Image (tube, coloured by chain):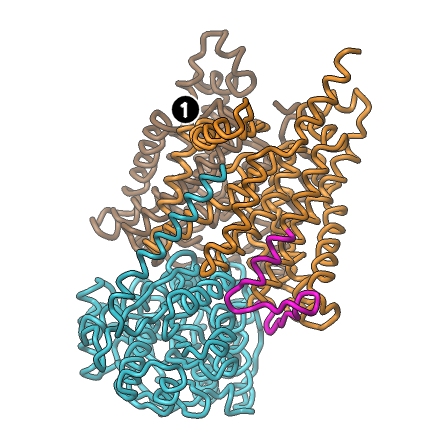
Amino acid sequence: MTTLFTILFDGVAYGMLLFVLACGLAVTLGLMNFVNLAHGAFAMAGGYICAVLVNNSGWPFFAALPLAFVASAAIGMVLERTLYRHLYARSHLDQVLFSIGLVFMSVAAIDYIMGSSRVFIKLPAALEGQFDFFGVGIGRYRLMIIVICGLLTVALQLILARTRFGSRLRAAVDDPRAAIGLGINVPQVFAFTFAFGCGLAGLGGALSAEILGLDPYFPLKFMIYFLIVVTVGGSSSITGPFLASLLLGIGDVAGKYYVPKMGPFVIYTIMIVILIWRPNGLFGRTAAR
Amino acid sequence: MFVRRQVLLAAGAVAAAAAAVPACAQEEAVKIGLIVPMTGGQASTGRQIDNAIKLYMQQKGDTVAGKKIEIILRDDAAVPDNTKRLAQELIVNEKVNIIAGFGVTPAALAAAPLATQAKVPEIVMAAGTSIITERSPYVVRTSFTLPQSSTIIGDWAAKNGIKKVATLTSDYAPGNDALASFKEHFVAGGGEIVEEVKVPLANPDFAPFLQRMKDSKPDAMFVFVPAGQGGNFMKQYAERGLDKSGIRVIGPGDVMDDDLLNNMGDAALGAVTAHLYSAAHPSQINKEFVAAYKKAFNNRPGFMAVGGYDGIHLIYEALKKTGGDATGDKLIAAMKGMKWESPRGPISIDPETRDIVQNIYIRKVEKVDGELYNVEFATFEAVKDPGKTKK
Amino acid sequence: MTTLPDVSTSAIAGARWRPGEIAFWIVVVACGFLFPSRYLIMTDIVRLALFALSLDLILGYAGIVSLGHAAFFGVGAYSAGLLALHGIINEPVVALVVAGFAAMVLGFFTSFLVIRGVDLTRLMVTLGIALLLEALAERFSGVTGGTDGLQGIEMQPILGRFAFDIFGKTGFFYSSIVLFLLFLLARRIVHSPFGLSLRAIRNNPLRGAAIGIPVNRRLIAIYMVSAFYAGIAGALFTQTTALASLDVFSFERSADLMLMLVIGGTGYLYGGLIGAVVFKMLQELFSTITPQYWLFWIGLVLVVIVLVGRARIHRWALWVPNLIIRQLAGRRAVVAVPESDPS
């Protein structure tokens, strides 16, 4: 029984991590209908920035995390202003070509700068190991992930639901043309959201180095996972991707634990079944734009 | 559109010709086609081999027996059909005398029929499945086979008070080789396997598998993951508190690859593995090798680097023996039975199987001068590949 | 009523062979004799071209996006491999067709999953199917050889006469002939009323249904044809390399395919062919120059292609050939095949 809880705990931590990594992608897709396959590259950037700060410059881990966020967001902002915005009106195929191109470039560039070996971030001792909670093994690091990601999710939800920016964003997602008509500066809203999403990915990348491993192929390896989260969850709200991430995380961990030989089947089967049942994702709107 | 096609083809041909020009000018050159994964998940293997060969040629010069040695590096990204195509092109177009490298078993196997057909020696510098050398009389290996180290760690574990073992191995030929030979020797020695998990080769998260290991409460866990994944594995091993619950890590040395070892953290301390090479091997030749490698590439050499280093050494020595004659049959004949002192210790090429015969060391991870090293404490001398001697 | 003859005239005009097309195939044959040392890479390109052609049939003509086309490629590859390995069908040509049909059967069953849903859903469902098959192939390693792939495939001579050689000459001409025949078939299909109805569906499924086209049935049919083509491409892969390993199903294979097709342009059959040539050539060129960092340059090319605009690049590339054709033909014959890109 306690094992079940440990598995659940691990799955939730994994899912939360996926959510932070992928939610920026969901917003990009939902808001601007832009397929940004390079999302993982921003996560990788965050991870490497954090690793360099902690390992080479001796920053404390918790100080490097916010910087990973800020730096990735800044990179995202710059790229959005210089490159991405020219492509919003283009076809999906162009967008795929472009963002895959960016991924290839980032992979080779990181390989060139940082080498192809895996990079690890030196963690403070307080985050290492596991403790027992009524017999359930709780990994300290995973607990921290759940706490950070949980807080972030709540904050995101509040921003979206309560703030003026949030209502603008929702309006822009629901109907960009009407939103422009109402005087909302949609491109600006989008630039901010894009940068914020990249920042979150960067933070996620820094957090995930310990669990998923950080190497130059990160954006390619996890692209599929991000896409699963977004398609299964639907891209019209953040609740959808959140639940989809949890489902994916728990499904993946439980699948590997209980049926180790069938691990990959579980995820893909769940995904296909859900997509057949709800082609627009669990929480997607039925009317496709 | 057809002009564009023509132009491109022409461009390709020109590029190929350009690559071939210096070769034509240098008639007395011996060409070695080095096919290793330089991109993709196995890239670190290719980099180490490439580095080691560069280092060797820097140290020993690029001329041997009056012939200039020329390395043609190609990236196969560890995909076998790439390997095969590249090998074929190198043999047919570049007229290479030797093909070498091969990061993974399927890649080495894919090239084997070509080696036979073209009578070109295939020097395997990384891939570790037993069967490779049997696939062609032109295959010579300078890396290792997994049964070599797995049988020995199996015997060692059974003799050293380890009763129950859970195994975690990557699900592909080398992993299965390692598991089978470990199991055979460990069970014969009176041990018991309590849990057996095969993890997919491309695997982001070890957590659930490790939880399974933990729940089966073994004395030790036998681990084989390919070089490069070891770091991630040990991180999660520590995270799950397996080090605290007294489950030791044993296995062939791939998981404790020197390349990554120092970044694994203190959880790796005390892990006992059997392997062919440790950067801490206490010989003068190794100390020099490690120092030179570190100086040149700012990293510690792993066993893949040694495989490459010995591979090129073997080629040099064989050429010396044949007096610069680079015909396949003569080279293979020269390589058979060759003995030399490598950074890993004394090694030789088995004249019958063309596989490597080497010492296998039992090592324990310890801190030396503040860095983690595999410190050798027992040696099994001149181990042949048990995967073949069995038959 | 006056529009009717117009439609059929333009359809017939569209189906006519253009000088540029004939020139294209002459160049293909010429390549076989001009570059005898490059058979292997050219075989690779021909195979990819066929594979890209199969994706173009569904993407360019029916508007179905797919990130899992490697599923059919893989099924074709393993079928051909298993048939040859166990000596069930020794004649490569027969095995090729059988492998194609095996992929087609898979295409039939999966088509029901794919025709539902919007673009993104289709992308993910197709991708999911390919990944599932990859996992299955890994799981049943007794049949497929698992991660090590099928080993020891030996191909019999084609039609009992032409043996596969180490230079890849047989393989190249064999693949090229297969590509040409299947291309003719595809050309016939897309210019038939069936093909035209597909285009109507792609442009607007609702309108298509309203004018009486059985939308789903047509989509299933073209999906199966496409699967057949991909299966043949996969079988060619196994037959010319004597290998079949798990990566035939890989995501990278599907993704590269998509890149090739998009570079070449969708919806005019030659897009995949040209894309395959361009992509493979670039890859070969870059990876020869810099085996470690060629990905960067490929990426840069992709980004530049998009930023400059594919349509513009196509225009530039076609400017010279158009000029020559006009001079030679002395009339307003245009080789430029306009690209129609579903967005």
Q: In which quarter of the image is the N terminus of chain A?
A: bottom right
In terms of image quadrants, where is residue B338? Answer: bottom left
* Shown colour of chain C: orange
- Residue B369 is inside the magenta segment: no
Was residue C150 drawn as part of the magenta stretch in this picture? yes
Q: Is residue A93 at least partly visible in the picture? A: yes
Colour chosen for chain B? cyan
| Residue B341 x %, y % | 26, 87
Residues shaded magenta: C149-178
Q: In which quarter of the image is the C terminus of chain A?
A: top right
The one of A221 and C94 positioned closer to us in this rendering: C94
Q: Can residue A28 be seen in this view?
A: no
Residue B366 locus on image (x, y percent): 28, 74
**Which chain hosts label 1?**
A
**Frontmost residue, C212 versus B371:** C212
Near-viewer residue (A164 or A198): A198
Where does the image place residue B117, in percent across and percent down from the top left?
50, 77
Quadrant of the image occupied by residue A85: top left
Give the labeled residue for mark 1.
Answer: A86
> Which secondary structure lies at badge 1?
helix
Instruction: Note whether A230 is above or below B244 in the view shown.
Output: above
| Left-right relation of A68 to C99 | left
Q: Which amino acid does label 1 sit on?
A: His
> Which residue does the image show at 24% across and 69% down from the upper left?
B26
In the figure, the shade used to draw chain A is: brown
Picture layout, residue B40 above or below residue B7 = below
Image coordinates of residue C157 in percent, x first then y, are: 65, 69
Query: Where A23 sits versus B77, above or below?
Result: above
- Please rate how many residues cluster around mark 1, counting C-alpha atoms within 10 Å: few if below 14, some from 14 to 19, many from 20: few
